[in-house]
Amino acid sequence: MKKTILFFLLVSGLGFSQQKNVKISNLPPKTEDFVFPVISYSDQPKVEYKINTFLQVDELEYVPGSQISPSKLVSTGTTSFSNYIYYYSWKKIETPKNILSIGMDGEASGAYPESFAIWKNFDLRTGNFINAEDLFQPDSVKIVEGIIRQKVKKRISDFLVRLKAEKNPPDETKDQIAMYEDCFTEHTLEDIRYFFGKDKLTFVAGRCSNHAMRALDELDSHEIELSYKELDTYWSAYTRNLLNGSDKTEKTSFRNKLYKGKIDGKYPVTVLVTRFYPADNNSGVKAFHAEYWYDKSKKLIQWDGQMKGNHISITENDHYDDATSQWIPRAFVEAEINGNKVTGTWQDAKTKKYLNLELEEL
């Protein structure tokens, strides 16, 4: 065990120095309300491209190289969230060799302004976004979620003991007690935020308060720190190689991947798989969202998909019809995933014409 720990520390120390080739600067145009990271990794241009594309499409709904400014949609409230979104700062976190973790702070202004903190984690060997579910063996996911859940509950419980110990508590304290007693704690790896550190993984579970009650929420978000050593039993093979500095990569899930390919053999497209939802227990069908764009036009088009086994079915909607209160489809996709390739058909909803679809994971 001592030799293993010493090896990890030596590799990690080497990794920190090797990350000097990964540079982060501000994506122009930097303004008071737009401070967004852009990655430069001259040794690995493909990795650089994948990380920057993911960040800008996922956060800004902007395709790199588009004619508009990267900050235009978020700063004018014209993203799919219909909020004005401001990014105030970013920070590169010290991590093992193979990992890039970036924290970002900002504010979303809709009916009410709401500050946010998010973290994005990438595999520097491939440029892929790191999914929390891929970090653990399949039969360990529920165990890790249980550990996180219990630590969140203990944090809330300990604070409740302090609140209930007050004699003649004011109404504000009574409201706090009610809020914490009703707090949602059933967090899963699918929806929890997290970031890597030098020797630990930090999970950030959502706070107990809604916007109206936030002033009463002294605990705020729940940061649960678990050392790599504590989680050693549960790591997947992918994570062991990720953490120990190995260049060996393991296959990871379909979610949050970038694919490139063509429709009809002549229209180059890029696809980013985004949100994934748990499988229906009865059917085994998983729902997901993806964004794709024709490389020439660079305009985002949304896909709403379902996945069962290696088969995916996707609806590409055209517009929402107020008269019928439903989405009018533009196209349908039926395809199979085989290794790092996706092959199938794209069918025009009006003409019913089929075009071949071929994609390959970047």
Image (spheres, rainbow, N blue to C red):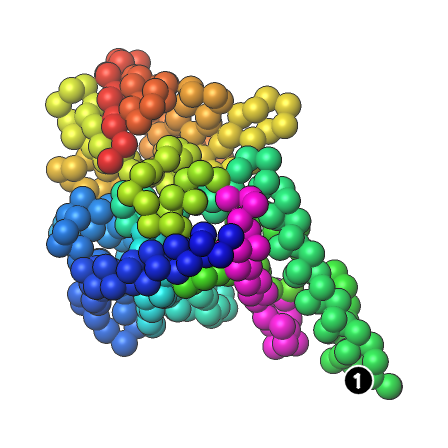
Q: Residue at x 51, y 52 (%)?
A: 1
Q: Quadrant of residue 93?
A: bottom left
Picture layout, residue 50 above or below residue 117 = above
Q: The C terminus appears in which quarter of the rendering?
A: top left
Q: Residue at x 39, y 26 (%)?
A: 314
In the image, residue 305 lies at what x, y percent? Answer: 43, 29
Q: Residue at x 59, y 70 (%)?
A: 220
In the picture provided, is 130 more to the left or to the right than 62? right
In the image, residue 101 lies at what x, y percent? Answer: 36, 59
Q: Secondary structure at mark 1?
A: loop
Picture layout, residue 283 above or below residue 57 = above
Nearer to us in this view, 45 or 99? 99
Q: Residue at x 18, y 19 (%)?
A: 264
109 is within the stretch colored magenta: no
- The residue beneath circle 1 is 170
Q: Quadrant of residue 238?
A: top left
Picture layout, residue 84 above or below residue 163 = above
Residue 62 in sight here: no
In the image, residue 134 lies at what x, y percent? Answer: 46, 41
Farthest residue, direction top:
353
In the image, residue 111 lies at what x, y percent? Answer: 49, 65
Residue 24 in sight here: yes
In the picture provided, is 164 more to the left or to the right than 262? right
Q: Is disc 1 surrounded by few (<14), some (14 to 19) or many (20+) residues within 10 Å?
A: few
Disc 1 residue type (three-letter): Pro
Nearer to us in this view, 101 or 173? 101
223 is within the stretch colored magenta: yes
Number of disc labels: 1
- Per the rendered image, the range of residues in magenta is 209-235
Picture layout, residue 13 above or below residue 259 = below
